[in-house]
Amino acid sequence: QPVAILRQAQDISPEGTYHYQYETENGISAAESGSPQPVGPKGEPAVVAQGQYQYTAPDGTPIAVSYVADENGFRAQGAHLPVAPAVPEQIQRAVEYVLAHPQPEYQQ
């Protein structure tokens, strides 16, 4: 059965920035904004975006996700998403040591 779109908007500029949003009659909604940014190793442009979406899962659980996509990758947040455990202190110290003392054959 078709689902009605209650609201929809979009704006795209010649420079590459954009924004869109929509909402459906069954409670799905989303919005995103983005723009080209010099994020590559040599300043190459890539779209940096942030947004959110929400819907109700089949079991009735409300799902809400906010996200950012940039030079650090795609990072989503939501109460339903698993959270990684904290890095043990010993492992963190080992990582810091390795980063502070790189092996000569791996240096550039």
Image (cartoon, rainbow, N blue to C red):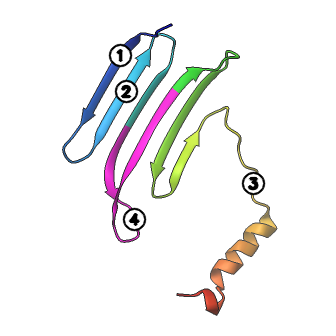
Q: Position of residue 19 (x, y in %)?
A: 32, 35
Answer with mark 3 or mark 1, whichever residue precedes in sequence: 1
Q: Position of residue 78 (x, y in %)?
A: 61, 35
> Which of 56/83 is in front?
56
Q: Amino acid at mark 2?
A: Gln
Residue drawn at (78%, 65%), measured in percent from left and top? 89
Q: Contact (CB < 8 A) between labels 1 and 2? A: yes
Q: CA distance from mark 3 to mark 2?
A: 35 Å
Q: Amino acid at mark 1?
A: Arg
Please state the extent of the stretch shown in magenta in the rendering.
33-53
Residue drawn at (48%, 45%), measured in percent from left and top? 68
Q: Position of residue 32 (x, y in %)?
A: 40, 35
Please give left or right for residue 46 compared with residue 81 in the image.
left
Magenta-drawn stretch, dominant element (helix, strand or loop): strand
Please give left or right for residue 86 compared with residue 108 in the image.
right
User: Residue beneath label 1, please?
Assistant: 7
Kindly report which numbered mark, 3 or 2, lies closer to the viewer in this rendering: 2
Number of the label disc, if any, that sits on residue 21 = 2
Q: CA distance from mark 3 to mark 1?
A: 41 Å
User: Residue beneath label 3, please?
Assistant: 86
Number of the label disc, if any, that sits on residue 40 = 4
Q: CA distance from mark 1 to mark 2?
A: 8 Å
Residue drawn at (31%, 52%), measured in percent from left and top? 36
